[in-house]
Image (cartoon, rainbow, N blue to C red):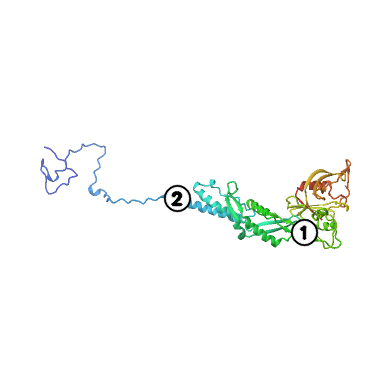
Amino acid sequence: MQNTVPNPRIQQSSEATVPSGAIDKTVAHVPISAPPPVIQHPSPAVPPLSPRMMPPRPIPSRPIRKKRMNWWLWGFLGMGMFGISTLMAGVMGILIIRADSDKFDPTIHLNPDDVPTRLKSIITTLNHGIAVTRILVMTPLSVRLYDPVTGDFAVWDMPVQEWDNWLVATPDATAPNGYRFDILAQGVTDFLMSQQSQHLDASRYLKLDEAVDQIQTAIRANTQATLRVYHRDRQHIVGAGETITSIAWDYGIPYLYIQQANNGISALSVGQTIIIPRADLFIEYPPIPNKRIEVSIAEQRVRVYENGILKWDWGASTGITSSPTWRGVYQILSHEPNAYAGNWNLWMPNFMGVYRPVPGADFTNGFHGFPTRGGGQLLWENSIGTRVTYGCILLSNTNIRLLYDWAEEGVVVEIN
């Protein structure tokens, strides 16, 4: 007799009982297999969960697809915007700080090699505008005028409305900020001519080409241009009692130069018009504005100025009446450790030539210390303060050494 094992997967009917050995047609499609072998365990087997105790299965639903976000793109854009804003803030900070500073430096340049690659193109684009702005914040552009004859200075300001259109920036890898700045010469020339007509008398003028070049150089170097004032020849109408010598003394021009300018005339008549050579005739070298030497014939003193401040004030001796030291505005022309004056057989230590008393001469009058004669005789040691020389300016040996080292060629010497 074959035993049957109830299959838990087949629901048992409570209405009918299937006889042993018969087949229930309602479940004929379900295979019936032998029961699995029983495995003995030390602990009692846990009974299976009944259908009521089984957890409910989740109802399957359509999966929800999440929208993908390009985080890398948003991150890149965010970093880019942050970088640009930081850069612009830095640029504005530089401009504001530099504009308020006396030490404004237009050579500051944003270097693309110092920043991430993604900002290089931005910086390259901005550099041109920044470079031009640096110049404009220095407005108004000022130029300083210097008259070596009078020693006076003046300042002309160029409003930005007049000169900003003159500025041209050209890329130049050799320039400190990557751009070379040029100005349109015609605009500057027009401005200088206008200022000249308003502020300079007819006897004084600017060399316009020279002035434009100096302003150009100053803009590139971020310095103030100093323009020299030049003088023209003058005319003099001879008055009663005047001679060539007296007129020459009054104008501060050695009389032989006045004769030369007037075809060698020797006699004058009242009402005659003669030419007086320009006052800066003896300014042969570019003048040095911050140094000046003044010689007082009446006081027999030498005063030395640096940056407008008195540096030294010494007693001195000038020329005797028959061979005077001539009034005028001159310059230091030369330095000789020990010069020889053949006419008087004098050796003059630390000699500095100042002016040529005779047109075209190869000798000059100037400064020197106590001279010697005949191999060692020292002259005029006790004569400081009186007129004893033959046209030069005598200083003590101590003072002449100081002046010799301090005054380079080009320093203006005014004798009155």
- Residue 21, by quadrant, is top left
Residue located beneath label 2 in the image? 75
Of 305 and 70, the residue lying toward us? 305
Residue at horizontal 43 percent and vertical 51 percent from the top: 74
Of 374 and 98, the residue lying toward us? 374
- Residue 43, by quadrant, is top left
Q: Secondary structure at mark 2?
A: helix
Q: Look at label 2 and name its amino acid.
A: Gly
* Mark 1 crowd level (few <14, some 14–19, many ≥20, 10 Å Cα): few
Report whether 225 appears left or right of 74. right
Q: Secondary structure at mark 1?
A: strand
User: What percent of the width, then of the height, locates residue 407?
Assistant: 77, 48
Residue located beneath label 1 in the image? 234
Can residue 223 be spotted in the picture? no
Report whether 244 appears left or right of 32. right
- Residue 22, by quadrant, is top left
Q: Quadrant of the C terminus?
A: bottom right
Of 11 and 311, the residue lying toward us? 311
* Mark 2 crowd level (few <14, some 14–19, many ≥20, 10 Å Cα): few
User: What percent of the width, then of the height, locates residue 11?
Assistant: 17, 47
Q: Are the residues tagged 1 and 2 within 8 Å (C-beta)?
A: no
Q: Earlier in the sequence, mark 1 or mark 2?
A: 2
Q: Look at label 1 and name its amino acid.
A: Arg
Report whether 197 appears left or right of 45. right
Using the numbered discs, state the Cα–Cα distance from disc 1 to disc 2 in whole angstroms. Answer: 78 Å
Front tag of 1 and 2: 1
Q: Quadrant of the N terminus?
A: top left
Residue at horizontal 45 percent and vertical 49 percent from the top: 76
Per the rendering, the mark at residue 89 is none
